[in-house]
Image (cartoon, coloured by chain):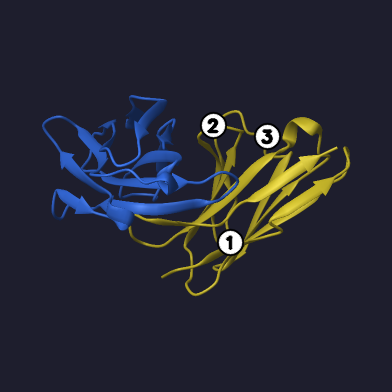
Chain colours: A blue, B yellow
Amino acid sequence: AQSVTQLDSHVSVSEGTPVLLRCNYSSSYSPSLFWYVQHPNKGLQLLLKYTSAATLVKGINGFEAEFKKSETSFHLTKPSAHMSDAAEYFCVVSLGTGNQFYFGTGTSLTVIP
Amino acid sequence: GAVVSQHPSRVICKSGTSVKIECRSLDFQATTMFWYRQFPKKSLMLMATSNEGSKATYEQGVEKDKFLINHASLTLSTLTVTSAHPEDSSFYICSAGTSGRFQYFGPGTRLTVT
């Protein structure tokens, strides 16, 4: 069985300060992990993905995430938040067979000016 | 990159009518297509998985007679919400998968049932 847990339903940061969105997973297999962002009334946009290559993954818009197998974590970070980063973020885990995605419950990021 | 489209992007229908949503992979062939439902301020809930030419596999609690899925070709899947009711109002998102561990998501369809 596998699942993904996003530890914070809401995160609020000031513009220009670092962002940390936490994600832990459980999987019996070597997982693929993804972070998606969703702006209000919009579809999903892929930020970055981990598929068993480098454990530090760089994505778009300055985001990055580190796969830590010992901690079963895949936290999303950004050094300096921008107002346009305010959105909903989803951590997703996938197995190799069937391509099925398992979504976390999401973290709503608010950026304070 | 691979593109998945959905049509329509928004639809309003009256209670009791049926509405069809199309999901197309525009520049690749999708071995598997997925349908998700998203309630306001909630995460995506997988409704069903469909493979071309075979019956869809529905998740527990999803009524297959209510949400009809057809995957007629490697580039097209349709979701028909039959006898829609206001509680069916939601954001429906499809995705298309290939042989790798990845899904390409469509932009979503906002269904409002009045």
Badge number at residue A80: none
Left or right of A38? Residue A80 is: left
Between B63 and A14, the residue placed more toward the observer is A14
The span from disc 3 to disc 1 (Cα, nearest Å) is 20 Å
Q: Which of marks 3 and 2 is nearer the N terminus?
A: 2
Q: Are marks 3 and 1 on the same chain?
A: yes
Query: Which residue ends up furthest to the bottom in the rendered image?
Result: B27
User: What residue would you read off at disc 3?
Assistant: B63
Which residue is located at x 73 percent, y 37 percent? Answer: B89
Q: Which of marks 2 and 1 is nearer the N terminus?
A: 2
User: What residue would you read off at disc 1?
Assistant: B53
The span from disc 3 to disc 2 (Cα, nearest Å) is 20 Å
Between A16 and B12, the residue placed more toward the observer is A16
Q: In the figure, residue B78 lies in which quadrant?
A: bottom right
Q: Is A71 drawn above or below residue A15 in the view shown?
A: above
Task: Indicate the amino acid at tag 3.
Answer: Glu
Q: In the figure, residue A17 lies in which quadrant?
A: top left
Query: Which residue ends up furthest to the left in the rendered image?
Result: A70
Dot 2 alpha-carbon crowd within 10 angstroms: few under 14, some 14 to 19, many 20 or more: few
Task: Indicate the amino acid at tag 2.
Answer: Lys
Q: Which of marks 3 and 2 is in front?
A: 2
Give the letter of the chain under mark 3.
B
Give the letter of the chain under mark 1.
B
Give how far across and how far down residue A100 sits, in percent. 41, 45
Between A112 and A8, the residue placed more toward the observer is A112
Q: Nearer the viewer, mark 2 or mark 1?
A: 2
Dot 1 alpha-carbon crowd within 10 angstroms: few under 14, some 14 to 19, many 20 or more: few
Give how far across and how far down residue A101 sits, in percent. 41, 44
User: What residue would you read off at disc 2?
Assistant: B42
